[in-house]
Structures are given as structure tokens and as C-alpha cells.
Image (cartoon, helix red, strand yellow):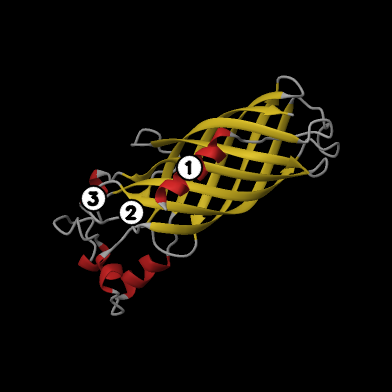
Amino acid sequence: MKTKLLISALILCIISANGQSKNYKYGVTAGGYIQQYNGNLGNSFFKFNTVCFAGVSANFGLYLNKSFDLNLGGSMGQFGYCQTEADANRVVSLKQRCPGCTNRLGMGELRAFMVSGNIALKYKFANNIFLKENSKLAPYIYLGMGINSLTDNMGRHCVNEGNHLSINAGLGIKYNITERLNIGYNIGLGCFMTKKVYYTNALASEDTDQDAEDIKMEKRKDMYMQNTLFLGFNF
């Protein structure tokens, strides 16, 4: 099953689409990204001096009209968080630590292999309302949903393996070298909606006896950020 998921994601990652036009309604792009984490373990968003995880991503896009595209996307790569010294010395309850990190004060670390697929509706500002449709610089925003398959890399049983649904949003800008060829930058956010990414002792035992701090941590959503550089081709 995981092999089929990986093959499907690879097919998606071979292609990626960006800002088509009425002359070229389909587009493919491919790119590489740096991925960062924000959740109960800590926050590495925009902290590029900390450990970052890398991967590849792609989308296939369909031109709907001058303002909207429909995008299908995929990505695959390492996902996680490496604790700082302050994180390592943070005192948390035994329930909030993962089964493989019970000998530490902090919650531990997270390292997983993540394969993702998503669908999104993209709004283009180069639509003859804000900018000319044939503008060289073409910014955009998008909103969609994704499914993310996580596999434990560390072997410490600290990853809640399986499929996780997410809400995805982001923005970016592309530079149209020609009407068919473009390069660009995209920053995307994913918020896991259905279950925790970090596998704690409380989840392992299905313990319902939680204190106020445990409840607060359970309510907090795990998120990821992808900073991507891409190359695109419209046809």
C-alpha cells in the first residue's frame, strides 16, 4: 500500500502547474522545497539557522478563467522537528512524551517521511483586474485540502503513522520568461486536522485522564511550511 502511495506521489511530483493562460490551458512545474514544523514540539517557521528538511513538490493545473486555476499537487520528503536546547530542558508530563523518548525531559524530536497529495483553487492577480493577464510578474494565492502519509524514520515510535488530512493554503509569485516558460517561488502552509502527528504515550494508551496542560497541548494543531522554488511549463 505504501509503495502504491509512493508511486502515485512520484507521478504527481513529475508534474506541476502554474498560472496558465487562455492560450495554454495546462501547465506543469517541478520544484524543490525546505520544510519546517510548528506544533507542540516547538516552532521552526522561518528559522533557517535550525535544522530544515528538504523534499520535492509538483502540481498539475487547469486554467478555469482569467482569475482562477484548479491545481492538483504532490510532494514527498523529510518532515520533522529537531529540538533546541531549551526544548530539551522543557519539562512535560510523561503522557506527552513519545514511547521512545521517555528518558528525556522534553517531548523529544520528530522525523518522518511524508508523501502528500492535494487539490486547491488558485486565485491569480494577473487577471486584468489587478495586473495585466500577460504580466511578467504574476502573484497568486490558493486554498485547498490535502492528504499526507507519514512513515516513522527514527524507529522510536514517535510518529503517528498513517494518513493525515490537512487544510492547505499559500501564496506565491512567478516570473513569466515566455508565455509558456516560467520560474517562481511559493510558500505553502498545511494544518493537520484529524489527528496528532507526534505519537505520545497518551495516544498509545488511549488515556483519557488528562490535566489542563495535556488538554491544551491536545487542542493545538500541528502545521508545516514549505518554501519552494519551481520551474514551470505551460501547454
Neighbours of disc 1 within 10 Å: few (<14), some (14-19), many (20+): few
Q: Residue at x 63, y 41 (%)?
A: 171
Q: Earlier in the sequence, mark 2 or mark 3?
A: 2
Q: Residue at x 56, y 40 (%)?
A: 12
Neighbours of disc 2 within 10 Å: few (<14), some (14-19), many (20+): many
Residue 132, position as x, y percentages in the image: 84, 31
- For the residues bearing labels 2 and 1, Cβ distance under 8 angstroms: no
59, above or below 182, in the image: below
Amino acid type assigned to the residue bearing label 3 in the image = Gly
56, above or below 5, in the image: above
Residue lying furthest left in this view? 103
Measured in 3D between alpha carbons, the distance from the residue under mark 3 to the one under mark 1, in whole angstroms, is 23 Å
Amino acid type assigned to the residue bearing label 1 in the image = Ile
Dot 1 falls on a residue whose secondary structure is helix
Relative placement, left or right, of 62 versus 144 is right
Measured in 3D between alpha carbons, the distance from the residue under mark 2 to the one under mark 3, in whole angstroms, is 18 Å
Residue 63, position as x, y percentages in the image: 77, 40
In the picture of the structure, the residue carrying the numbered disc 2 is 41
Q: Which mark is residue 155?
A: 3
Q: Quadrant of residue 96?
A: bottom left
In the picture of the structure, the residue carrying the numbered disc 1 is 7
Q: Earlier in the sequence, mark 3 or mark 1?
A: 1
Residue 169, position as x, y percentages in the image: 60, 49
